[in-house]
Amino acid sequence: MTKLQRKNGDNTRKKIIQAASHCFAKMGFSGTPMQRIADKANINQALLYHHFKNKKMLWKTVKQHYVEKSSFQPIPVSNNLTLESVLSNIVEQSYELYTQSPKLVRMLLWQQLEANEDGLMGGNSASPDQWLEVLDTLQQQNKIRQDMDIQMIMIWIASSLSGIALLKLSRFKKDKSVYSNYKEMLLIEFINLLHP
């Protein structure tokens, strides 16, 4: 493959991701036919399938694209972590990701409406399932109660944070005190429940 072919392939891939981002945010997963994405990208459908073998793969790629464009950084696992620092990091990064990527928020909301599409969840480095290793480490270090299931903790934190996405983000952006109060309330509740 020549440099020109690789550059053309990269440009086509970017066009597809941009078109899919627009379509998925507007119509959701089930409401977006691959042909519509191909039309929006101004390519033929065969070329779309050359770059993405199926719509689920494209959906996950678009979500990962938003994560990569954001300031998101995975939480490294170490013995120096505190429950407070991990929870604060999760809340802060989720807020930043949601406020930086309104189309991603729309995709996540659409994703919740997809009844039979479990395969749409996760698939990116900001997905809540990425917190499991850090939370498990904290539990092993007796920094999280032993009688609590890590999966349930992850679901509880993720559902609590979805409030940021479900409420008007503009309210959080306009008045930082609303976000600060919400964050503080979340952290207090998380720590009170999880701390041994």
Image: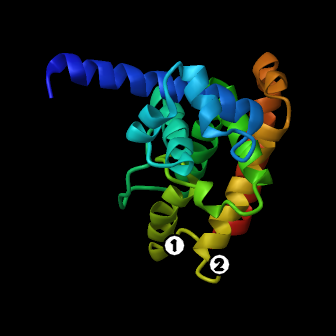
Instruction: Identify the image's colour scheme: rainbow, by chain, secondary structure or one colour.
Output: rainbow
Going 67% across and 60% down the picture, which residue do you hit? 117
The circle drawn on residue 148 is 2
Establish if 9 lies above or below 59: above
Establish if 194 lies above or below 110: below
Q: Position of residue 128 (x, y in %)?
A: 58, 55
Q: Are marks 2 and 1 in contact (CB under 8 Å)?
A: yes
Q: Quadrant of the C terminus?
A: bottom right
Going 36% across and 61% down the picture, which residue do you hit? 79
In the foreground, 155 or 135: 155
Q: Residue beneath label 1, please?
A: 139
Element marked by disc 2: loop
Q: Quadrant of residue 116?
A: bottom right
Going 73% across and 40% down the picture, which residue do you hit? 28
Q: Amino acid at mark 1?
A: Gln
Q: Position of residue 82 (x, y in %)?
A: 50, 56
In the foreground, 14 or 171: 14
Q: Position of residue 118 (x, y in %)?
A: 64, 63
Q: Position of residue 98 (x, y in %)?
A: 66, 33
Element marked by disc 1: helix
Q: Is residue 79 visible?
A: yes
- Callout 2: 10 Å neighbours few (<14), some, many (20+)? few
- Left or right of 58, for residue 21: right
